[in-house]
Amino acid sequence: MILVRKVSNFIALRHLPLMLAAVAVALLLAPDVAGARSRAARYHTARSHAARSYGGNYDGVWNVVFVTTAGACGSGLSVPFSVSGGRVSSAGGGRVSGRVNPAGAVAVDVQVGASRASGGGRLSYRSGGGSWRGVIQGQPCSGTWQASRG
């Protein structure tokens, strides 16, 4: 029993420099966990700030006029939309969802009762425009839209 313990101590002591070298290499090559957390926190803060800053460029109530170019749907309907932080929502009736990206590209889905439409286009600081298509009161229709910030 004593002999086994002395042999194992001898083996452990003989390999100690190798084990210390392995630990040192592992510590040098290991990722900086605190630094990685710090970098991740800075990244998410920057993304959050960017979302707030570009969203403000388009924030407000926009009056959108829809013109039908194909189909038997009415034309000239004016609808208010709200933009807040890059998100588009209804400022009147119906269900509206959509996004505006930093360059002003917008994509929106609208539903009022059984009528549905999707549209896309671009907003600038005070105006915008694009196209839409959908089924309005059972009729397939499509057209253009023009927006102005109110």
Image: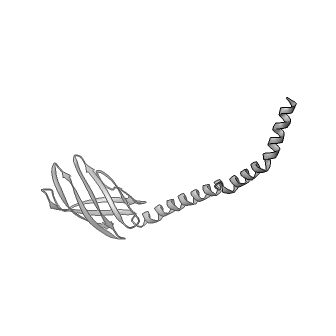
- Identified at 32% across, 59% down, the residue is 107
**Apparent side of residue 87 relative to residue 144 in the rendered image (left or right):** right
Residue 33 in view, yes or no: yes
Give whichever of 12, 135 is nearer the camera: 12
The outermost residue toward the left is 72
Res 59 → quadrant: bottom left
Report x, y in % for residue 46: 53, 62
* Residue projecting furthest to the right: 2
* Residue shown at 35% from the left, 70% from the top: 124
Left or right, residue 97 beside residue 10: left
Q: Position of residue 5 (x, y in %)?
A: 84, 34
Residue depicted at x 50% and y 59%? 48
Where is the N terminus found, in terms of image quarters? top right
Q: Is any atom of residue 149 visible in this view?
A: no
Residue 30 sits in which quadrant? Answer: bottom right
Q: Position of residue 96 (x, y in %)?
A: 31, 53
Q: Above or below — where is 114 with respect to 91?
A: above
**8 or 80, nearer to the observer:** 8
Residue sitting at 64 percent across and 58 percent down?
35
Name the side, left or right, on which 138 lies relative to 123: left
Quadrant where the C terminus lies?
bottom left
Left or right, 122 with reference to 72: right
